Image (spheres, rainbow, N blue to C red):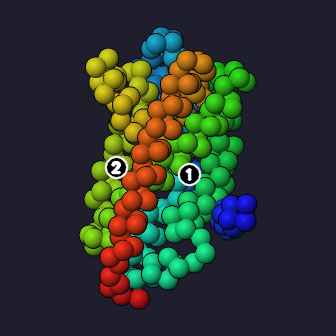
Amino acid sequence: MRSLAKYFAIARISARSSSTYLADLAGRTGFFILILFILSRVWDKLLGAGTVEGLKQRDLVWYLVFTESLLLAVPPFEQNIEEEVRSGSVAYLMIRPVHYLGHHLAAFLGEVSVRLSLNLLVGAPFALLLGGPPPAPPAGIPWALVATLLGLTLHFHLLACLALIAFWLEETRPFFWIYQKLLFTAGGLMIPMEFFPGWLRTVLDHLPFSSVLYAPARLGVRYDPALAFGLIARQALWLGVFVALSHAIYRRAATQLQVNGG
């Protein structure tokens, strides 16, 4: 319990620190609204009064609110890990009484909680104006919250795996760029999985990227018990894989740490 209290304290401090930079957050929110407006108009022209597998234009507006809120809520923590490795300060951080990755995860979730809350507070009225009330029933809210937490934690560990490559490679930004583009496409940032051809959707469903953005947004838009269970189970499976992988990379790096600066 004492160990968990340390991580809760880190998350609380990170959230408090993030909330002090409201001007910066407001700037990102303005960009967020611009994206929502443009994409919602595109979907309105393409879909009109029609539906795709039961998803209406109103559903897509709310879907965009969820996916864009999640993506824009993520702080660039991977850059901090990369810089710590490059500078050699990671050697000092490893000896603290908290796990290195656990510390970054707690700080990540603390900051994301503030950013995501602000994005949803701004995006929800916008979606109400353009699309109407939320389509998901109250019964789907707990599932959407669980999927959001799992998706964000999976996102953290995916990025952590890439950031920890800095122990061996000096430049890791191309990996982040590729991963970001995979989230845009295979992750369902702007296009739900229902819009893809059957064979392609099957492939994308078995990749981890759809578990980051599509799963929480889909459950936030339309609740289906069978679909919810399948999405949550897939998220948990991929989370287990990348938690194990990120910790394995970290342990491997820690055993052969060579400080090149700091």
Residue 239, position as x, y percentages in the image? 47, 44
Tell me the SS state at disc 1: helix
Q: Which mark is residue 73?
A: 1
Which quadrant: the N terminus?
bottom right
Asked if the residue under mark 1 is in contact with the one under mark 2, i.e. CB atoms within 8 Å, the reply is no
Q: Who is closer to the viewer here, 159 or 95?
A: 95
Residue type at the position of mark 1 = Ala
Other residues around mark 1 within 10 Å, as few (<14) / some (14–19) / many (≥20): many
Which quadrant: the C terminus?
bottom left
Residue 78, position as x, y percentages in the image? 44, 63
Residue at left offset 50%, top offset 76%? 94
Residue at left offset 58%, top offset 40%? 148
Tell me the SS state at disc 2: helix
Residue type at the position of mark 2 = Tyr
Q: Who is closer to the viewer here, 71 or 229?
A: 229
Above-or-below relation of 50 to 84: above
Q: Who is closer to the viewer here, 136 or 170?
A: 170
Residue at left offset 27%, top offset 70%? 168
Q: Who is closer to the viewer here, 246 or 197?
A: 246
Distance, label 2 to label 1, CA atoms, is: 16 Å
Residue 36, position as x, y percentages in the image? 52, 38
Residue receiving disc 2: 179
User: Position of 79 compared to 144: left or right?
Assistant: left
User: Position of 11 compared to 63: left or right?
Assistant: right
Mark 2 or mark 1: whose residue is earlier in sequence:
1
